[in-house]
Amino acid sequence: MSGEYTQGVRKNWRQFLLQVLTVFAVGLTMGAERNVVPIMGAETFGLESVLVIGSFVVSFGVVKAVLNLYSGKWADEYGRKPVLVLGWLAAIPIPFILIFAPNWWWVTLGNVLLGVNQGVAWSMSMISKIELAGPDERGLAAGIDEAFGYTGVAVGAWLTGVIAAQYGLRPEPFYFLLLVIAVATLLAVVLIEETLPYARAEAADDATDGEPDEEAELPFVEIVKRATYRDRTLFAAAQAGHVENFVDTLVWIAFPLFLVAQGLDVAQVGVVVGAHSAAYFLQVYTGRLGDRIGRKPPIVAGFFLAGGGVLGMVLVEGYYAWILLSAVSGVGMALHYPNLISVASDAAHPLWRSTGLGVYRMWRDFGYAVGAVLIGISIDLVSLEAAFYGTAAAMFLSGTYVILRMDETHPEFGDYDVS
């Protein structure tokens, strides 16, 4: 690739670093709700039904899933930066809603806006990193993106837990959230640059190597069909992404409630929840691992490790044991999370990669909504522990399906045909 749009992490380190800061801020925004809000539902608003408490995750998941899909489409049409700025502007009302919410349904509304922010801002930061890095460092870029994003989630959950333990569940934790959103919005408007020209330059290079023109011009509906069900490998990735977010939803909703019921305070809950998200930092290495040994091995290993960590949470007792098992489940997530993104990216043409990734992320993040409903029903009708057993079983079954149906998409380790 020639000219000013040469790809590579080192070549584009300044913009890549800014995109890392962006996704860290996205994670902080999400983490600021992860610890405090479920406890606020029970203690501030007196909610008893976990299904009702989980409604804020349902609204988040549905909106984030849809915005993942359409933000990818808009980014291919209008560019990455304007869509990124839109995502941060949508986040500005969130802390005010959480501070002044008179009832739980206002919190649910706030999470609609959080879904917009996460679906748009995280998607744009991720695709920009992939475009800045190029094909040879795609797994590394995805790993760094997810690592710093979920490190932000961990830091946000821990900080708001500490603030809430010192000052109360609101409003003080959400002043921190307001500061994060303000800084990130300024960063997006002033310093972030457009990366769509990198995708166009990559496509031009591919064309000189004999890439068929019709592959670059697939209509939106055809991209959705291919990434959803017409390709068995991409279907395997979509279902895996969908189920993996059952774990994330369990950590968001059930971990705080389960741990409080076991006698931990809000600051201790923040440490246990934060240990899970902090393990996601390993994606810096696990994404690169997928570049070196292929995508499928770390995906399969990750599903069984994450499922085992979740199962262990209800089989042992003790604060430090819960920290360890929460981290184990996080390590499992770190193994498969960036490599599933790489599978979707491997299979996409540069000119519709953002849309293709948007389809994958849509099905993945619908897992928040489906998981919240299933987990809420399990807890309301059976027990808190039942949600842990069910989530672990889903991970084991999904990992088995990946073994049986997913082809290796890394060009050096498999013969997957993207055409």
Image: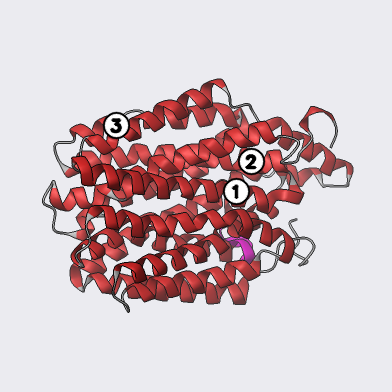
Estimate the x, y position of residue 217 in percent, counting from the top left.
71, 41
Q: Look at the image and name its color scheme.
A: secondary structure
Q: Is residue 261 above or below residue 70?
A: below
Which one is in front, 301 or 234? 301
Image side of residue 390 versus residue 293, left or right: left
Residue 367, placed above or below residue 73: below
- Residue that appears at 74% across and 43% down: 216
Please rate how many residues cluster around mark 1, counting C-alpha atoms within 10 Å: few if below 14, some from 14 to 19, many from 20: many
Residue 197's place in the image compared with 207, above or below, is above
Q: Earlier in the sequence, mark 2 or mark 1?
A: 2
Q: Label 3 near label 2: C-beta < 8 Å?
A: no
Secondary structure at numbered mark 3: helix
3 part of magenta stretch? no
Say what amino acid the circle numbered 3 marks. Answer: Tyr
In the image, residue 92 sits, relative to residue 212, either above or below, namely above
Assign the N terminus to one quadrant of the image: top right
Q: Mark 1 and mark 2 in contact (Cβ < 8 Å)? A: yes
Q: Pinpoint residue 188: horizontal percent, then vertical percent.
A: 52, 27
- Type of the residue with mark 2: Lys
Q: Amino acid at mark 1?
A: Ile
Residue that mark 3 sits on: 175
At label 3, counting other C-alpha atoms closer than 10 Å, the crowd grade (few under 14, some 14-19, many 20 or more) is: some
Name the disc covering residue 211, or none.
none
Stretch of the chain drawn in magenta = 228-234
Q: Which residue is mark 2?
A: 129
SS for dot 1: helix
Inter-mark Cα distance, 2 to 1: 9 Å
2 or 3: tag closer to the N-terminus: 2
Q: Is residue 381 left or right of residue 207?
A: left
Which residue is identified by label 1? 144
